[in-house]
């Protein structure tokens, strides 16, 4: 009858509609790539957003759109895309932990750039929880996350938490059967230098930074970010030390409780690693 014909027609029309949206999204994505090749990132971002609007469950579109939005410093859009990806991954029947980790890492970076330290720390902790569940609590793949947490805690003057993260990283590396790369050792020594610097243990900090620089410079593939990071910290250290000298601070500075124990642990670890 007429009702059945209308139902059939509606089904066919819906199918055509969905196919049209898919084709339109594919066209928008293709045009976005073309715009990128022609160095028109603003247009590319708009087209990627259009592709996401047409196919909001397409991870490839969301990933590309989030990367472009971040490059253009459209942090509101970046967050929206990343949160959508997180929701899709979490709803999967068997969530892929590595994909969840990637989103949490990107959210932590986004929040850090925005100056939202508490939100960045929360994302790092969630990523660390997934890593721990996926790899175990003593796996070296947790170390990079611990470094990032320690760095964030140092910037926030949360010395006790930073110390805990670094001690845990040292213990994981010491217990690991895998050989520790020079890059890991350089990052560890840099973060140890950061901890000593904010604790006003300037001699120990400079020693750690110097060792880190030697390792950064010895890498077969240069790490410009690592080198620049440690160089900047050395500049800050020397400025702080000079300011301290001008202020006529006592020779025996007061250090946070536990700093001596940490220094001993670091010395033992350095002898093992380097």
Image (cartoon, rainbow, N blue to C red):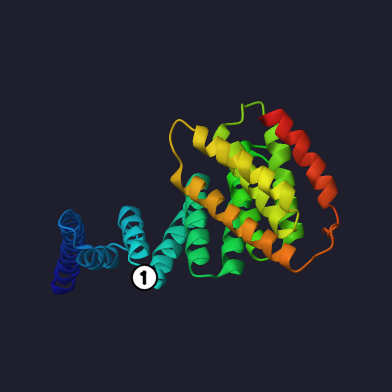
Q: Position of residue 144 (x, y in %)?
A: 58, 45
Image-quadrant location for residue 180: top right
Image-quadrant location for residue 185: top right
Disc 1 crowd rating (10 Å Cα; few below 14, some 14-19, many 20+) is some
Q: Is residue 231 visible?
A: yes
Please tell me which residue is depicted at 50% across the width and 46% down the height of the picture.
227
Along the viewing direction, whichever of 15 and 208 lies nearer the viewer: 208
Q: Is residue 134 left or right of residue 228?
A: right
Q: Is residue 141 visible?
A: no
Q: Quadrant of the C terminus?
A: top right
Please tell me which residue is depicted at 49% across the width and 59% down the height of the picture.
109
Please tell me which residue is depicted at 64% across the width and 37% down the height of the picture.
139
Q: Give the mark count.
A: 1
Q: Position of residue 13 (x, y in %)?
A: 16, 66
Q: Position of residue 121 (x, y in %)?
A: 61, 62
Along the viewing direction, whichever of 189 and 59 lies nearer the viewer: 189
Q: Is residue 177 left or right of residue 119?
A: right
Q: Is residue 268 left or right of residue 86?
A: right
Q: Which residue is mark 1?
A: 74
Q: Position of residue 47 (x, y in %)?
A: 21, 65
Along the viewing direction, whichever of 47 and 259 lies nearer the viewer: 259
Image-quadrant location for residue 182: top right
């Amino acid at each position: 009858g007429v009702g059945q014909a209308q139902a059939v027609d509606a089904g066919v029309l819906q199918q055509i509609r969905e196919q049209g949206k898919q084709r339109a999204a594919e066209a928008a994505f293709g045009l976005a790539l073309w715009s990128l090749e022609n160095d028109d990132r603003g247009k590319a971002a708009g087209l990627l957003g259009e592709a996401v609007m047409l196919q909001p469950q397409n991870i490839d579109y969301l990933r590309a759109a989030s990367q472009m939005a971040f490059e253009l410093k459209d942090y509101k859009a970046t967050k929206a895309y990343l949160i959508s990806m997180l929701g899709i991954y979490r709803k999967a029947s068997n969530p892929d932990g590595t994909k969840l980790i990637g989103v949490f890492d990107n959210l932590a970076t986004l929040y850090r750039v925005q100056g939202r330290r508490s939100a960045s720390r929360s994302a790092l902790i969630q990523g660390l929880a997934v890593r721990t569940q996926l790899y175990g609590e003593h796996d070296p793949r947790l170390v990079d996350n611990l470094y990032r947490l320690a760095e964030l805690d140092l910037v926030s003057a949360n010395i006790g938490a930073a110390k805990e993260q670094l001690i845990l990283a040292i213990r994981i590396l010491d217990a690991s059967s895998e050989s520790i790369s020079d890059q890991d050792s350089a990052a560890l020594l840099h973060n140890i230098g950061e901890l000593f610097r904010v604790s006003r243990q300037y001699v120990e900090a400079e020693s750690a930074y110097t060792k880190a620089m030697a390792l950064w410079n010895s890498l077969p593939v240069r790490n410009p970010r690592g080198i620049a990071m440690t160089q900047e910290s050395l500049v800050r250290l020397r400025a702080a030390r000079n300011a301290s000298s001008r202020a006529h601070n006592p020779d025996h500075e007061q250090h946070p409780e536990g700093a001596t124990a940490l220094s001993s642990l670091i010395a033992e670890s350095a002898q093992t690693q380097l």
